[in-house]
Every structure is written in structure tokens, then in C-alpha cells.
Amino acid sequence: MAHIVPLNVNIKTLTTLVVLTITTVVTAKYVDLGHGHYNLLLAMFIASIKATIVLGWFMHLKYDGMMNRAIALCGLAFLALLFGFSYIDLFYR
Amino acid sequence: MSTAKIDRRVEHSHHFSSMQQEYEAGKQGVWIFMATEIMMFGGLFVGYFIYRFAYPEMYIAGGDSLNWVQGAANTLVLLVSSFTMAQAVTETMKGDNKKALKYVIVTTACAFIFLIVKYFEYSAKVHHGLFPGFDMWNPDMEYIKSHIRDTSLLANFSAENLRLFFVLYFAMTGLHGIHILIGIGLMFWIMKRLKNNEFSSKYYTAVEGVGLYWHIVDIIWIFLFPLMYLI
């Protein structure tokens, strides 16, 4: 029926996520990117990569049909809409 | 119409035309639920960012007072639990209920470890008067000041703005914690069904659905950890 994700792929996924977590901690705690929000942006960028990996491999979206991908993207699209309008409201009022 | 119990391992419900169709419909329902989860937590994240840009110093002071080592440990615990859950789905899909049960037990153990660490974090915050409700807000400013990384932030310090950070901290990690609790309940349900050998390589919808839920809870923590503890 559906694609079975083998053990070694799951181990690789976990390893990548752990490495990225360590990267998050090191870059946030010991690398000062100065004023502005560069540290925040970097941390969110790494978190987004991690979330994509979880969605793709642990949640099988990489092997899944278009319908479930579309549903997940719908949730994210509406979230982006909320972020976008809040941003416009906050900074261009 | 028959009301007799069907053997889901080999047959589908009468209102579906095939096991494949029943599986896809069930999984799609779980995905729609996941989309609503993304949007529910998304609202809280938007609130977090709006107030962060209004009072950045309070977020830095509040974040510094949290124990990032405990937060990082919990991140690793959740990542491992996500791995064991993914592996449980893999084993169920192969038809090995016994092996899958072992992986679900490890996942549940990780969920309990997460909650125990969270208990120690919460009780430390409550002890220092940092719980923003039930008349418990009585911040220990010496505690906050001793943890702050950048002392220049202390100039424009107000306990009321700091309260905002802890409202968001407890609301977001609390809602996430409730999801962990619900997840544990679902794990016990899955464990019972795996123990009764109710799944097969043709029927594993429930395990995969609980897996999807568990991974979304992990994803939310992936964002919460840097936002609350590190940045």
C-alpha cells in the first residue's frame, strides 16, 4: 500500500535533527550577530528546516499523495496570511 | 446491514469501497486536524512576535531566566520520541505489532520524561513568583537580574512588561504540555490495540494518525524552544 520508511532513513532523519538542534543552541548562545534581529531570524530559519524535515520524512509527506501535501500547505498558507497582515498592520500603520 | 464487528486487519467498513480508500480517508481527516493545529498555535506565535517587537528587552530578560539546558534536554527527548514513533509506524506497516509496541512504549516514556522536566521548570518559575495568574505574580527581581545576559537592559525595566513574556510562556508551553498529555492518552490506546494484535500490514491507520499528531507536537516544540529559551 503505502511506502514503508526503513530504519536507516529514520536514523538519518533523527541525526540531522539533533545536529540542527545543537547548531541552534550554539548559534543562539555563543554567536552574537549584533543588533537587529539576525539571531532571531537565524534561529527561525534553522527551526523551519527542522520542521520541513519532520514534515517530509517523519510525517511521510515526501512519500504521500498530493492531497495531504495540499492540506498541510493550506494550514501553513493561512498562517502566512495571518503573519503577513499582522506585519503590515504593525509596521505600516 | 450488518452490525457485526469486522476484522479491520483484512476487511474494510461497509461504507467504503476498499481498504485503501478507508485508509486514505482516515489519514486525510488526520491531516485536516493537523492543519487546524498549525493555525491554532500559529495565532499564539503571531501574538508572541507582535509583543516581542514592542518589548524586546522583556523577552530577552524573560528568556534568560529560563533554564535553557532543561529546554534543550527536552528538545532532544522529543526528537528521540518522534524517531521511535516513526519507527513504530514503520514496524506496524511491516505487520510486526510486537516490535511496534516496544517503540510506542519508548515514545510514551519520553513523553513522561518531557513532562517531569517541565514540572521542575514550572515549579522553579512559580517559586520565584513568575506565574502570571491566580494572584501568584510576585516576581523575584533579584533572580531575574542575576540571570540576565545584557545588564544594559535593566535600565528600562518594568515588571508588568515582563509579566507579558510569562503569560505567553505559560500559555504556549502549557497548551503544548496539554497536547503531550493527550498524546500520552493516545499512546495508551495504541499500546492496547498493538498488544491485542489489531493491526496488520494492510491496516495501520490509527498508529500512523497518532504518529502524525505526535510529530506536529514535536514541530511546535522545535519553534518554541529557540523562541522561549534561547533568543
Image: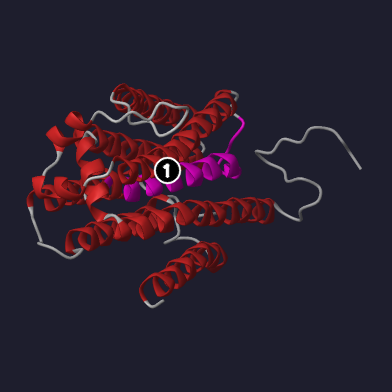
- Asked whether A93 or B97 is in front, the reply is A93
What residue range appears in magenta? B198-225
Pinpoint residue A41: horizontal percent, then vertical percent: 24, 63
- Asked whether A74 or A80 is in front, the reply is A80
**Left or right of A75, for residue B143:** left
**Left or right of B8, for residue B88:** left
Q: Which amino acid does label 1 sit on?
A: Met
| Residue at the bottom extreme of this rendering | A92
Quadrant hosting residue B73: top left
Most frequent secondary structure within the magenta stretch = helix
- Determine the chain carrying the residue at label 1: B
Q: List the residue tagged with mark 1.
A: B172
Label 1 element class = helix
- Asked whether B192 or B141 is in front, the reply is B141
Q: Please tell me whether residue A61 belongs to the stretch shown in magenta.
A: no
Pinpoint residue B176: horizontal percent, then vertical percent: 44, 40
Question: Which residue is rendered at x = 33% and y = 28% of the image?
Answer: B138
Residue A36 appears in the rendering: yes
Crowd rating for badge 1 (residues with CA inside 10 Å; few <14, some 14–19, many 20+): many
| Residue at the right extreme of this rendering | B1
Residue A3 appears in the rendering: no
Pinpoint residue A20: horizontal percent, then vertical percent: 21, 51
Question: Which residue is rendered at x = 48% and y = 56% of the image?
Answer: B43
